[in-house]
Image: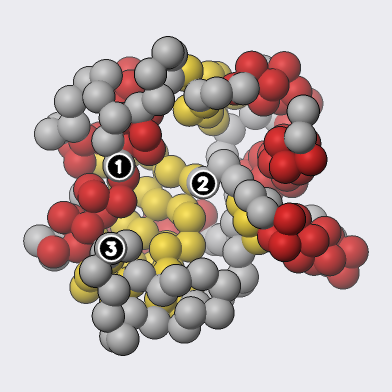
Amino acid sequence: MTTTHLSIVANGDYQLRLLHRQGLRNIVMCVGHLGEMIQDYVGDGARYGLNVRYVFDGDTLLGTAGSLKNALPALADTFFIIYGDAYLRCDYHALHQTFITSQKPAIMTVYRNAGQWDTSNVIYADNRVILYDKRNLSPQMAYIDYGIALVHQKIFDAVPLGVASDLATIYRDLSKNNLLAGYEVYEPFYEVGTSDGIQRFEAFLKTQAT
C-alpha cells in the first residue's frame, strides 16, 4: 500500500464525518482498482453513523460518468456527487436549496481559484455555470470545479452502460445548454492525490477542528 493510498483512505475518515455533520446518511462509493482496500477500511459506515454501500467498476474501468451510470440503481433520483480524493467543506443544505430554486438538472460547486491551486476551468456568474470546459481554456475562467455537485439521474440518460465515459463531458455540455447551475464555495479544497496536497491537508488539520 503506498503513502498516497493510505492518505486517501485516511482522508475518508474526515470527509465521511463531515458528511454526517451535514445531515447525509446514505453513501454509495464508486470504486475501481484497489477499491477493496476502501471497503475493508470503511466497512458499512456504521462507525461514522452512515450507511455505506459500494459499486465496483469490475474488470473495465468505466471513468467518472461510466461509474455513476453503473451505480444509478443504488442512487436516489437526485444525489450528491463528491470527489473521493479531497476534503470538501460546503453547506450541503444551502447547496440543495439553490439546486431546487435553479430548476436545472444539475448544480456544480465552484471556487474562485484564479489559477492558484489548479487550472481554472469555469466561467461563473449569478448562480450559473456559464461555461465549464477542461480542454478549451480561456482567460475568463477564474473559477474551478470545487468537487461537489448535486444532479438528477436524467443527466446520464445518454451515457451507455458499461462503457468508459467522462463526467467532465456531461458538465461541459450542460453548461453550454444553460442547464448547469452554480454554487460558489469560499472554503479552499484539500486534495490528497499528490504529496503537496497531503502536506497542505495535514497543515490544515493542525490548525482547525474537523
Q: Where is residue 24 in the image (x, y as percent from the top left)?
A: 56, 39
Label 3 to label 2: alpha-carbon separation: 20 Å
The amino acid type of the residue labelled 1 equals Asp
In the figure, residue 108 lies in which quadrant? bottom left
- Tell me the element at label 3: loop
The residue at the point 67 percent across, 25 percent down is 38
Residue 52, labelled with which disc?
A: none
**Residue designated by label 3:** 135
Label 1 to label 3: alpha-carbon separation: 13 Å
The residue at the point 73 percent across, 55 percent down is 195
Quadrant holding the N terminus = top right
- Tell me the element at label 2: loop
Extreme residue in the bottom direction? 139
The amino acid type of the residue labelled 3 equals Arg
User: Mark 1, mark 2: which one is toward the viewer?
Assistant: 1
**Residue designated by label 1:** 166
Q: Where is residue 196 in the image (x, y as percent from the top left)?
A: 72, 62
Horizontally, residue 23 falls left or right of residue 32, namely right
The amino acid type of the residue labelled 2 equals Tyr
Decide which of tag 1 and tag 3 comes sooner along the chain: 3
Horizontally, residue 90 falls left or right of residue 210, namely left
Quadrant holding the C terminus = bottom right
**Residue designated by label 2:** 83
In the figure, residue 144 lies in which quadrant? bottom left
* 113 is higher (above) or lower (below) than 102: below
Decide which of tag 3 and tag 2 comes sooner along the chain: 2
- Tell me the element at label 1: loop
* 186 is higher (above) or lower (below) than 198: below
Horizontally, residue 191 falls left or right of residue 171, namely right
User: Mark 3, mark 2: which one is toward the viewer?
Assistant: 3
